[in-house]
Amino acid sequence: MTDIIKRPGGAMANRPLHFFWLADCSGSMYGEKIEQLNYAIRNAIKPMQDVAADNPNAQVMVRAIKFSTGAQWHIAQATKVEEFKWDNLTANGVTDMGLALQLAAEQLDVTQMPERCLPPVLVLVSDGQPTDDFNDGLNTLMSKPWGRKSVRIGIGIGQDADLEVLQKFIGNPEIRPLQANNAEDLVKYIRWASTVVLQAASAPASQVKDQASGGVVPIPQAPTSDVDTDDVW
Amino acid sequence: MSWQIIGESVRGASHKRNDKLNQDAWASLQNDYCSVLAVADGHGSSKHTHSDIGAKLAVQVALDLFNHFAQQHVDTGSNLRHIKQSADYLPSQLVQAWRLAVDTEDDGQTENANDRYSLYGTTLLAVLLCNDYVLYLQIGDGDLIVLTEDGQLQHPLPKSVSLIANETYSLCQDKAIYHIEFCLHFFDHQHRPALVFLATDGYANSFSNENDLQQAVQDFQQQIANHGADKIQSCLADWLNETSEQGSGDDITVAMVFSDYSPLLIID
């Protein structure tokens, strides 16, 4: 009789990857911009799920923060990407971006996110300038181990977006903020962040400590802006 | 006391999907005066394109260095103090020997030394077991766990809390010797280990928590006692492939050295 020997150890588990949307819902986003942001994120769900399904060794969990006057969880519970749905955001108020970073930072502690996790992805989308203490929020975020190791993407909507602030958020000169000047750009960038960036973060190779000049995950080239369209924000 | 060694290395599930090589390596050596076991994990990213070779060089260098170390002290009849003093030089000797091996392998293709070592970047875990002492050494991520005769699990080397998000220390770093952890235990003061377990990080990352990893180490000892080392060796590749598929997706290498005892129980 052939022995069937139980594999040593307990149940296997794939590695969690936490993905955060940080969405500007200030009054200046009112109208077409917020509608297009809702559309772009909803449009990216299926491709995002497809990318996640291609890598069964990562479990992608999605959350979302909305910020205007204050910052709140839009999706508070880390939600499996397979179950991720998007409820429309509405726009009103100022741009408390720093508070949004602080809210995200609370979840980026090693007590909340064990070391076996994959690097989290934070995608910040904004059309304006912070009205609160952005630097304070960023410092809080960067004080957390997973905050420093996160993959941070910044998408500016329209000509008034503060790209300098988004670059500070990204914290990596090799990754520039993306400026969406029209609805097509926004869809394209949101999809890129939801798929290409997600894919890169979900299967990272080892990086030698203090030598990862381009961040802990090399990020592929972003798509270029569609400059031919007439419909510019 | 005699020791047995088993081990296996498998290509990660994600590496199979992406058509990448296994960048881990392991090697062992046994003779009249020592047993040596080493495991390495090449970094694998685009900056480290020869890290699979770097890992193979690292385990071979560790074997040669530890074997020489053990032989030297047997031949000269060194006292414990002398062994301890000599061990302090091992980190620098290891880095120097690995760099020399890389230089030979690279054969002048990469002019800049830092770039050259980076191409071959790898971690390393190694253990040397002699009659009077055991020496543990590690640079970078991975797990080195000791199971004592009374069933206690120990981590003889400190774990770096700053290493998350796939970051690791490496033999290719400029100041690699400062990131090498090692310790020496003499058996006049400490018990001999029953089993020393080495694994690359793809193994631990396949469990949801540290307890499940520790359980695996205890299970291995029990399975060896129940079924014999040869049987467990024959199962290892399938187990590790399953672990990578259902867990981290990374390359996985597991190797262990354990006291050579008769199976306690044979299960039909």
Image (spheres, helix red, strand yellow):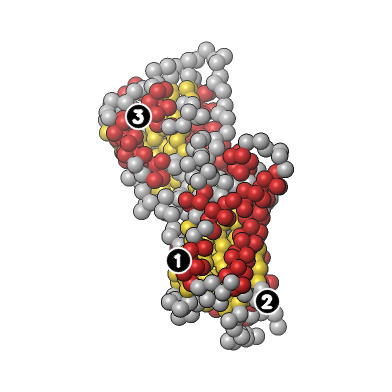
Dot 3: element: loop
Query: Are both tags, 3 and 2, on one chain?
Result: no
Look at label 3 and name its amino acid: Cys
Dot 1: element: loop
- Residue A1 placement, left or right of B77: right
**Mark 2 in CB contact with mark 1 (< 8 angstroms):** no
Mark 2 or mark 1, earlier in chain: 1
Image coords of residue A201 (percent x, y): 53, 42
Within 10 Å of the Cα at label 3, are there few (<14), some (14-19), or many (20+) other Cα atoms?
Answer: many
Chain under label 2?
Answer: B
Camera-side residue: B48 or B90? B90
Q: Which residue is mark 2?
A: B230
Image coords of residue B235 (percent x, y): 66, 71
**Residue at left 61%, top 39%?**
B113
Look at label 1 and name its amino acid: His
**Residue at left 60%, top 42%?**
B118
Image coords of residue B195 (percent x, y): 54, 74
Chain under label 1?
Answer: B
Q: Which residue is mark 1?
A: B155
Q: Which residue is mark 3?
A: A25
Residue B253 visible, this orientation = no
Dot 2: element: helix
Q: CA distance from mark 3 to mark 2?
A: 63 Å
Chain under label 3?
Answer: A
